Amino acid sequence: MSEPKHSYKKLILNGIFSENPVFRLALSLCPAVAVTTSVKNGFLMGAAVLFVMTMVNITVSLLRSFINPKVRIPAYILIIATYVSITDMVMAAYSRAAYKEMGLYIQLIVVFAIIISRAELFASRNKVVPSAVDGIGMGLGFLGALVLVGAVRELIGKGSLVGIQILGKDPLLIAVLPTGGFFAIGLLMGLFNWIDMKYFGGKPDSGGGHH
């Protein structure tokens, strides 16, 4: 059976809009809420997931002919854990302050459903380049979501943006609490649903050739 052909542009847009991991698929919401009290933390977590997801997709695609279907999930987790360990050590070495705040959540990337699902639904069925593009698209969607949520929460909850004080009035501290995080994500989910329905038809480009 020939592999489905993919538009790389559609794969990128799919990850950012139609199947955005946070706003459309509602995956990994607890870590998303936990780390998005600021733009910086959201960016660092998103960048880590972008790297891990892209490398996992590439690796799974390269090894898909050698991975026994009976042990594919443990194999995927082993591959994910390898790249998460690399990310964890790099962040611990070069961004210690941020690592103290979110080191635990970096380690939890190993069990992020979105990474395992893309390895299973897309990378295991497609060639390296489309798999890499899919990983980049999904990773960018996750990164963009965390930065956007972090910007909203930091601005409303702390009166600052990227550490620069903008609002002089007393901030709404609830925005940096878990309740405020879920509330912000809920509002942004509604916005993304509207954008996707209006401009992209609300039809995601499924990875395996079917949805």
Image (cartoon, rainbow, N blue to C red):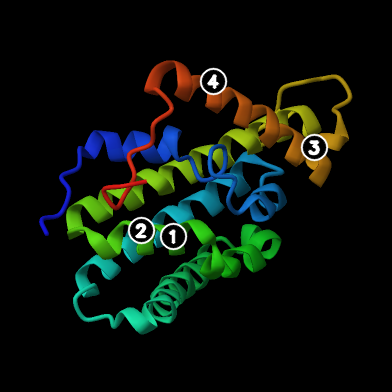
Residue beneath label 1, please? 117
Q: Nearer the viewer, mark 3 or mark 4?
A: 4
Horizontally, residue 186 falls left or right of residue 54, namely right
Picture quarter with the N terminus? bottom left
Q: CA distance from mark 2 to mark 1?
A: 6 Å
Q: Nearer the viewer, residue 184 or 102?
A: 184
Residue 194 bears which disc, if any?
4
Q: What's the CA distance linking mark 4 and mark 2?
A: 26 Å
Badge 1 crowding class, 10 Å Cα cut-off, few under 14, some 14 to 19, many 20 or more, is few
The amino acid type of the residue labelled 3 equals Gly
> Height in image: 4 above or below 11?
below
Quadrant location of residue 148? Answer: top right
Which labelled disc corresponds to residue 23? none
For disc 3, the marked residue is 180
Lower position in the chain sequence, tag 4 or tag 1: 1
Q: Is 44 placed above or below 204 here?
A: below
Work out how far the residue at label 3 is from the one at label 2, CA to CA, in angstroms: 33 Å
Q: Position of residue 163 (x, y in %)?
A: 67, 36
Which labelled disc corresponds to residue 121?
A: 2
